[in-house]
Amino acid sequence: MDRQFDRRQFLAFSMAVLLARPALASGDVIEVHKSPTCGCCGMWIEHLRANGFDVKVHDTTASRANFGVPQALGSCHTARVGGYLVEGHVPARDIQRLLRERPTAAGLAVPGMRQGSPGMETGVKDSYEVLLFQPNGHYVVFQRYGAR
């Protein structure tokens, strides 16, 4: 009987540990392509690391168009993770949700340089949307931040 009790405790503890971990797929590394001189990109990378991502950084001048991000959704850096593209200052929790839900899409984007988004913390908080986009440029709102 004591043995069963120990097994239940172990299973309960194991589940608690697994549920507490960030929702990342096993082996997913987020590869960030950014300008070597961009400070906000570095701050976004730190945000990703603080939220459990394994980040590989590529200092490059490669264009987001090379990766298939529609020009209208552009920002200052492009990342790839789990078969998706991530453009701009997308919060880590939205990337985690993307990897958990695995929708049919090219990726996520926060177009422009939205104040208050991860890596753009200046004291000003713009409202902004995280967009789930398709290869053809069509998109839907994935998440909203701030008042709209």
Image (tube, helix red, strand yellow):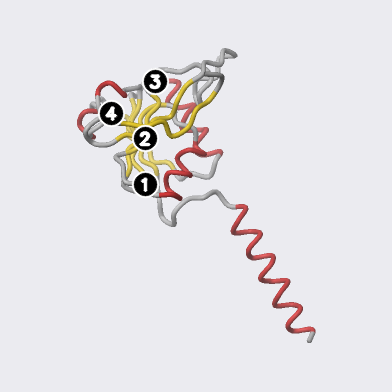
User: For the residues marked 2 and 3, what is the alpha-carbon distance in whole angstroms?
Assistant: 25 Å
- Residue depicted at 55% across the width and 40% down the height: 51
Image spot of residue 121 (x, y percent)? 55, 19
Q: Amino acid at mark 2?
A: Leu
- Residue depicted at 73% across the width and 82% down the height: 4
Q: As displayed, is residue 25 above or below residue 79?
A: below
Residue tagged by mark 1? 103
Instruction: Mark 4 or mark 1: name the one nearer the start of the chain.
Output: 4
Kindly check if marks 4 and 3 are in contact, taking CB atoms under 8 A apart as contact: no
Q: As displayed, is residue 14 above or below residue 46?
A: below
Q: How many C-alpha atoms fall within 10 Å of the one at disc 2: few (<14), some, or many (≥20)?
A: many
Kindly check if marks 1 and 2 are in contact, taking CB atoms under 8 A apart as contact: yes
- Quadrant of the image containing the N terminus: bottom right
Q: Name the residue nearer the viewer: 52 or 93.
A: 93
Instruction: Mark 2 or mark 3: name the one nearer the start of the chain.
Output: 3
Q: What mark, if any, has residue 132 been given in the picture?
A: 2
User: For the residues marked 4 and 1, what is the alpha-carbon distance in whole angstroms?
Assistant: 29 Å
Instruction: Mark 4 or mark 2: name the one nearer the start of the chain.
Output: 4
- Residue depicted at 31% across the width and 24% down the height: 73
Q: Amino acid at mark 1?
A: Pro
User: For the residues marked 1 and 2, what is the alpha-carbon distance in whole angstroms?
Assistant: 9 Å
Residue tagged by mark 3? 38
Q: Amino acid at mark 3?
A: Cys
